[in-house]
Amino acid sequence: MEKRHATLSLVFLMLAVSCSAETSTHAGSGQAEAPKPTKQVLKLVLPFDKYELTQQDSYAVAEARDFLIRECMKKRGYEWNILHYPSRVDEIKNRRRYGVVEIQVARDFGYHVNSAILSGETDVPRQHDEREKRLGGDGIKAAYSEKSGCGYKANSILDEGGGSVNYHLFNRLSSELLIKAKRNSEVARVTRRWAKCMRGHGYTYTTPGEAIGDPRWWKKKSDKASSVEKSVAVADVQCKSQEKLVEALFEAEARLQEQAIKRHGAYFSKLSAAQVKYLGRVNEVIKVKGAP
């Protein structure tokens, strides 16, 4: 499959977020423990989500990849430890899709984000960091170098027989439909109410995107939110809750995604088939390479 499905080890390394169009690119690297996701977050399951790997699937990919990299690194004279992945995790793919939506996250982190917030996990990224420290610069190069790295080779092996599907359309639709949902008349009306609510707290932002993108939060390359940032984020969440902005956005986007799936039925069927093949290959590698 196309490299849409980055393994979690690389997600933790790069703090990718495929997670949200409104998540800042200035993500911090700290691994402070994030609050458990709220019921509201757990219910944010969009129609497109079933065409992507679940969090649990991603852990399976990471485990299979570990086995393959270990074999390759051993030939190069390096030890590659297999990380211990959780057997069950909450699916929180859309935790930050609509910006900060949880009051405790706002209080603790403001608009900043780390892998604990994105995945709900702190131990796996800790293990990942420890492994990289042991590897050192040359070991990291052997593992991650483009084309020649063991990670690249592992991805190629996992892709064998997994079907080839271009995810460009999927990614484009995912981005465009969220933008379109924000322009929905009802969402726009609720957003204006959100802005009025924010003015009541003393802030003049017109949209949540404007609040999260305030340059003041990102002047310093730090993963720590200031007290002012946290105050704004808390007011943001409170106003979203009061005006039910997240619900309005979710309903509008879900409706648009359902329409897109019907409109591009053959394409989405190919995505499903390719994903089944890919995960079959992943499980095969785990069974063979992970055997004692």
Image (cartoon, rainbow, N blue to C red):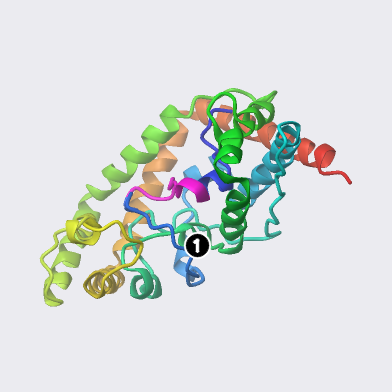
Q: Is residue 57 above or below residue 193?
A: above
Chief SS of the magenta region: loop
- Which corner quadrant of the image does residue 291 belong to? top right
Asked if residue 67 lies left or right of residue 291, the reply is left
Q: Tell me if I can see residue 235 in this picture.
A: yes
Q: Position of residue 53 (x, y in %)?
A: 58, 43
Q: Amino acid at mark 1?
A: Ala
State the residue at coordinates (72%, 36%): 77
State the residue at coordinates (56%, 54%): 129
- Which corner quadrant of the image does residue 102 belong to? bottom left
Asked if residue 233 lies left or right of residue 214, the reply is right
Crowd class of label 1 (few under 14; some 14 to 19; many from 20; radius 10 Å): many
State the residue at coordinates (59%, 25%): 148
Q: Is residue 292 above or below residue 104?
A: above
Q: Nearer the viewer, residue 189 or 214?
A: 214
Q: Position of residue 76 (x, y in %)?
A: 71, 32
Q: Is residue 240 above or below residue 48?
A: below
Disc 1 marks which residue?
Answer: 116
Where does the magenta region start and end?
12-21
Q: Residue furthest right?
A: 292
Q: Position of residue 68 (x, y in %)?
A: 72, 36
Q: Position of residue 163 (x, y in %)?
A: 63, 24
Residue 19 covered by magenta stretch: yes
Q: Secondary structure at mark 1?
A: helix
